């Protein structure tokens, strides 16, 4: 720095001294410059989207995926429950009022309530019997359009005429049916009259319940008791396996070689398990049968008081004449 007189005043003038850079400083400066350029380039690459480490940690509020939506709704319901003291539980009316407060339509809340009331009936059964031959009960449920009385009448009409069932019990909120055992029903099931198989007639009992959701829809719940088919398959499996075990015991008593004597027990066990497992296929067919009933109700294919869906016609009249001739 140096003092320079200008216009009667003194000012500082910066004097730049140019020197030849030393070879060491030149190399260091070049290396430092290259490193600086690399750092700048890396920062520019990060800013341009090459790396998004910090951005990944910031939630995107523009859109909420399904998993997050379920967690949010669940958490909001928990907060609402904590805010409102429900004690040991709520009545159905209080539950509907709570749903209105949180903005849940009454129809969906009523449907969820009905499904929860019926969920415990068909819970998973533990044990070897359930593993071998499947559950004792199967069910199907669906929301269908229509008023309760109309849907209930259509369901009853189809069970009587379309599935060849007879009323077993009547309750205020549900009806149960069992297979018809008269000659006409047996012949129609035996020859698959009407172009279909009557799967529901294999059940011990079918229970149907129709509940109101709103003025335009109702909830239909069907429950099939298949304890009879389960008992039959397990009994047959036990008989086959037991026969093999008896044959093995007799063979060992007679002094037959052990590998040969054990053969009937092994074959009987395998055949018994195979017989019990065959019921699983029948359960699938029964499940399809229940769903088909709901399909007919949902699409309005069943009209009470209409034509017989089972196709009585001339066959029914002939069977009636045969019963008269036999004095039945």
Image: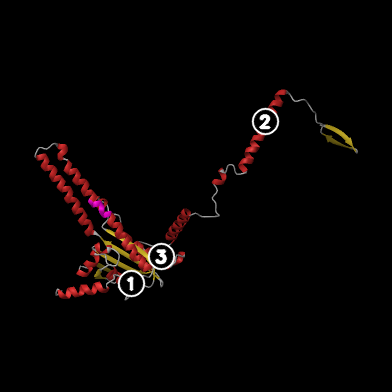
Q: Secondary structure at mark 1?
A: helix
Q: Residue at position x 67%, y 35% from top?
A: 37
Relative to 287, is 256 above or below? above
Q: Which residue is mark 3?
A: 109
Mark 2 to mark 3 CA distance (whole Å): 70 Å
Residue 266 visible (yes or no): yes
* Residue 297 image offset from top left, x and y in percent: 36, 68
Look at the image and say whether residue 278 sits in the magenta stretch.
yes
Mark 1 to mark 2 CA distance (whole Å): 88 Å
- Horizontal side of residue 143 vs 315, given as left or right: right
- Neighbourhood count class around disc 2 (C-alpha, 10 Å): few under 14, some 14–19, many 20 upward: few
Q: Main secondary structure of the magenta part?
A: helix
* Residue 54 image offset from top left, x and y in percent: 56, 44
Q: Quadrant of the C terminus?
A: bottom left
Q: Residue at position x 25%, y 74% from top?
A: 314
Say which mark, if any, is on residue 32.
Answer: 2
Mark closer to the observer (1, 2) = 1
Determine contact: label 2, label 3, CB under 8 Å: no
Say which mark, if any, is on residue 154.
Answer: 1
Q: Which residues are magenta?
A: 275-280
Q: Residue at position x 27%, y 51% from top?
A: 131
């Amino acid at each position: 720095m140096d003092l320079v007189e200008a216009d009667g005043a003194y000012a500082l003038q910066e004097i730049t001294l140019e020197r030849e850079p030393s070879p060491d400083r030149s190399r260091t400066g070049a290396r430092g410059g290259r490193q600086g350029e690399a750092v700048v380039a890396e920062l520019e690459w990060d800013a341009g989207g090459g790396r998004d480490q910090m951005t990944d940690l910031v939630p995107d509020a523009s859109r909420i995926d399904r998993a997050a939506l379920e967690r949010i709704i669940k958490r909001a319901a928990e907060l609402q429950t904590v805010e409102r003291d429900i004690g040991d539980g709520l009545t159905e009316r209080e539950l509907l009022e709570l749903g209105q407060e949180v903005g849940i339509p009454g129809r969906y809340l009523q449907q969820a309530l009905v499904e929860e009331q019926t969920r415990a009936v068909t819970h998973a059964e533990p044990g070897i019997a359930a593993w071998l031959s499947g559950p004792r009960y199967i069910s199907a449920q669906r929301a269908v359009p229509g008023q309760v009385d109309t849907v209930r009448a259509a369901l009853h009409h189809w069970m009587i005429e379309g599935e060849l069932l007879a009323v077993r019990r009547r309750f205020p909120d549900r009806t149960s049916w069992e297979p018809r055992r008269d000659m006409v029903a047996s012949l129609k099931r035996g020859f698959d009259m009407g172009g279909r198989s009557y799967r529901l007639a294999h059940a011990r009992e079918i229970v149907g319940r129709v509940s109101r959701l709103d003025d335009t829809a109702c909830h239909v719940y069907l429950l099939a008791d298949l304890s009879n088919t389960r008992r039959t398959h397990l009994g047959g499996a036990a008989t086959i396996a037991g026969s093999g075990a008896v044959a093995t015991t007799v063979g060992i008593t007679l002094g037959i070689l052990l590998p040969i004597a054990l053969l009937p027990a092994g074959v009987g066990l395998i055949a018994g398990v195979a017989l019990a497992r065959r019921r699983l296929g029948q359960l699938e067919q029964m499940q399809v049968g229940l769903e088909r009933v709901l399909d007919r109700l949902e699409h309005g294919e069943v009209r009470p008081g209409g034509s017989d869906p089972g196709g009585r016609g001339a066959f029914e009249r002939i069977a009636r004449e045969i019963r008269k001739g036999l004095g039945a």
